[in-house]
Amino acid sequence: MNTKLTGTSIIGSGRGDQTSDTFRAFNPTNGEQVEPVFFSATLDELDRAAELADSARIPFGNTTGRERARFLRKVADNIESLGETLIVRASLETALPNARFIGERGRTCGQLRMFADLLDEGSWVNARIDTAIPDREPVPKPDVRSMLRPIGPVAVFCASNFPLAYSVAGGDTASALAAGCPVIVNAHIAHPGTAELTGLAVAAAVEECGMPEGVFSLLFSGGYEIGQALVKHPAIKAVGFTGSRRGGRALMDIAAARPEPIQVYAEMSSVNPTFILRNAIEQRGESIVAGLHTSVTTGAGQFCTKPGLVFLQSGESSDDFAAKFQDLIRDTAPPSLLTKGIRNSYVDGSTHRQKEVTSFVENDERGLDGFAVNPAVFEVDGTDFLNKPDLSDEIFGPATLLIRSNDHEEMLAIARSLEGQLTASVHGTEADLAEYADLVAILETKAGRLIFNGFSTGVEVCPSMVHGGPYPATSDSRSTAVGTRAIERFSRLVCLQNFPDESLPDELKDANPLGIWRLFNGNVEK
Amino acid sequence: MNTKLTGTSIIGSGRGDQTSDTFRAFNPTNGEQVEPVFFSATLDELDRAAELADSARIPFGNTTGRERARFLRKVADNIESLGETLIVRASLETALPNARFIGERGRTCGQLRMFADLLDEGSWVNARIDTAIPDREPVPKPDVRSMLRPIGPVAVFCASNFPLAYSVAGGDTASALAAGCPVIVNAHIAHPGTAELTGLAVAAAVEECGMPEGVFSLLFSGGYEIGQALVKHPAIKAVGFTGSRRGGRALMDIAAARPEPIQVYAEMSSVNPTFILRNAIEQRGESIVAGLHTSVTTGAGQFCTKPGLVFLQSGESSDDFAAKFQDLIRDTAPPSLLTKGIRNSYVDGSTHRQKEVTSFVENDERGLDGFAVNPAVFEVDGTDFLNKPDLSDEIFGPATLLIRSNDHEEMLAIARSLEGQLTASVHGTEADLAEYADLVAILETKAGRLIFNGFSTGVEVCPSMVHGGPYPATSDSRSTAVGTRAIERFSRLVCLQNFPDESLPDELKDANPLGIWRLFNGNVEK
């Protein structure tokens, strides 16, 4: 695998042209451009990638789970064999430390192998079989069998904040490929070099495993035109996106206006309300304040699960808690954000919030290099919070808002006023959980994941994980972007009626040759 | 249960007003209005129903599966205890025979009891548990547990063509209530009396089972305003619709433009391509032509699964088959369609098609009473079919188009040209299935259900059924409107992290008190 960056798109087994529309990555620590130049894909190149994906749809969709498992493992192996080259490049483009990318690479390859294991085991297809009853009255019962099948070519938009785990070969790509869907990736302008390296690893795996070349393409783009055209393209049947609310909603609107509307899985915006009850502070105040600080500032606060709203019960212990938290934030070195745009949004957002509520950290960005910003903590009481709905808006980066309330009913009103969230957390005693069962019940209607005595950052990749939530947290609260169930997002149910056994896929054959769990005449069986 | 029709909406435990905006049902056999007058709901009444649904959201969502099972069974019992009153009214409003409604009532109550059984068994929630590993390196593994939870209040639009099975207490209502979602039904203008009777049965069950009154409301409306306002209402979190492509798309567009977009499950339009290969005709021509005739004309051809495109391989046997089919259609008594609008669309559609292709039945509606029409059969060759995309448009009612093609490649091109479908059927030998594997593979990307040697009408209600398909067959090809899996459409994944065992729902408790199937640390267990 030649890992020299060329800056051109990857289109099936070929490369895009060196077009006239170019851009470069930036080093966020000093704001300077880094080499090489990247070339935006043309609409013709997009068409070619989409045609290749369309022609790969049936052959790739008809590969066996084990063939796709081998392919996903090869992708993971190839990413690992990029070695330091990938880590150094990702760090250069994002100002996040090497150690972060060693961890994120582990998660990325772990996800790919998790889906490979899922495919090898095979039960994910949710096979159901109801056998015929030819002599049933008044009409015979037919033989009916169904399972999940690939939805078709998927467009994946790389996330600014996860250059590996939610980008070229990240969760959306892994789950779409696992389901049997060709993928066209739209690279993020913030880390095109990381994207190209990862893309080469995927493309090499396509070739090594003899997959149809249209299974994977990677398009570079300095603007929005290619991404929007990708979502409009008739060959594309679903979209995965992680980014801003504005960006996600724009893609949702484009997808909904297509002649054939398609599903966009956009993960957009979450302020992850965190309720820290008095008893928790009195019992474990020190560890909670340290945990909150880590959760708000790790990765420069650029996680979709960063606690952006922290509710405290008024009183002496919470005064003390807030003062300690303010100190920790004040002592935090200004981190560099991922892009100039993210830095500017952070400065605008926190400057605006400073005018509305009490701010405990001077938000003066003068004298900071590159895309660096000062972490910030704001404070407001419950009544004011309810009166100013924009206080729930996300500030992406190392900022959070403390809200003081001492009134159970007011806390319920606050919970009811929240938009959809990825997560909601409650810190307290087990007795508090019973006392605030009404609060938890409201939070359950607002969030995809509820956490007791823990912080929302750090998403475990496992079969039960739900990383999703009502709008605007995501565009589709029914599903998850993390964990094995993500494969269902790129699948659709298909049913075969009265097909002879030998023409059925192995998953639906009488003899169950794959040994998978199935619902057979209403019973779970293997 | 007082079953005297009042014509007013049912709003929780109360009734709507006798408003100034009124309408009546029609008797399709003579086109005359029937008593009583029905009163359109006001926007204020809609708001009241939505507020009631919103306040029922948490308490109803927190009922146990067994409580909801009892409620669904009570709904079924109450519908049955309406007896002849319901059957006679449904027949009066639709011109469909009593026997049809005895069958449809059986299906409706069967669906309600099927979901009750599903809730009693309990495994539908897809519970997953990953237990903690506190000493895992580099970070402890949290305890994570997830399951399906209700999505929130659902708006259900009654179908013209299924006054019982896809209307007030039909599939969408049953699956939404089963999931734990309050339902607001928008009655169909074609059968408001049937709707009121069924609504009374549901409302009585709400009261008898002590459910929150907001669990069910039924709104009458002579126009589109109430339905559109319902889809726009912020309390509504999902929509079920069965009807025309134009109507479904309009609701999809409204839902997608909301500040908080929501999912519309619209079942809209399908022409159910049916490929009858030469060998099938030579072996079983007589039974296939009779089966096709039944499938095209039963219920006046007003099924979403009616075969609207029938492909034949050119030759002597298919000439003979087509001639016999034309004779059968010519000898079919003109049936009455459900509404004047449906009748007019049928006449317009078939008159237009008559100009484009060969028509074998005179399409002259003069002298027919009420909303009666003549069944029709059209014919075209494969090349002309490919050149006239509007030949794939649905004509709702007893009409079908025969397409002759003798060229394998042309048949593939035809299959590729099709829009999304509910079903696709192939009649042939097992050897044909192998020879036409490429055709079947294309059809699989187009339809939710593939049928071998059978007709698409007659949808088995069972766990494996898939009644869905790519747009425009439905708005969401991932799911099904029929069968137990329909409950998933009104559910969303929710995850609980680190919650103490006693505060978990029974489905997620360590001891598995409900004895349901779960994925426990990656293993399927009970």
Image (cartoon, coloured by chain):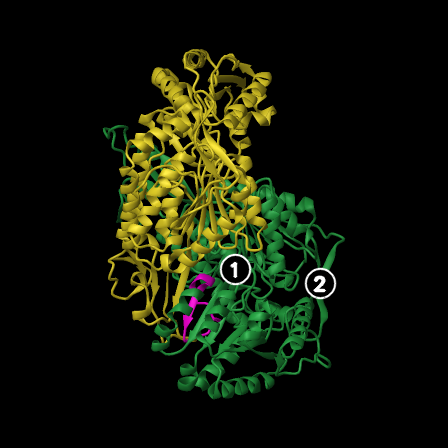
Chain colours: A yellow, B green
Q: Residue at x 34, y 76 (%)?
A: B430
Point out the stretch of residues depicted in magenta. B444-461
What type is the residue that disc 1 sits on?
Gly
Kindly tell me whether residue B145 is visible in this rendering. Answer: yes
The image's mark for residue B24 is 2
Estimate the spatial distance between the alpha carbons at disc 1 and disc 2, rounded to whole Å.
Answer: 22 Å
Quarter of the rendering occupied by the N terminus of chain B: bottom right
Q: Which structural element holds mark 1?
A: loop
Q: Is B90 rendered above or below residue A439?
A: below
Chain ID for label 2?
A: B
In the displayed structure, does residue A41 sit left or right of residue A384?
Answer: left
Residues indicated by labels 1 and 2 sit on the same polypeptide chain = yes
Pointer 1 residue = B170
CA neighbours of label 2 inside 10 A, class few (<14), some (14 to 19), many (20+): many
Instruction: Say whether residue B457 is magenta.
Output: yes
Where residue A44 sits: x, y (%)? 52, 50
Kindly tell me whether residue B372 is visible in this rendering. Answer: no
Where residue B150 sits: x, y (%)? 46, 45
Q: Which structural element holds mark 2?
A: strand
Q: Is A412 rendered above or below residue A326?
A: below
Chain ID for label 1?
A: B
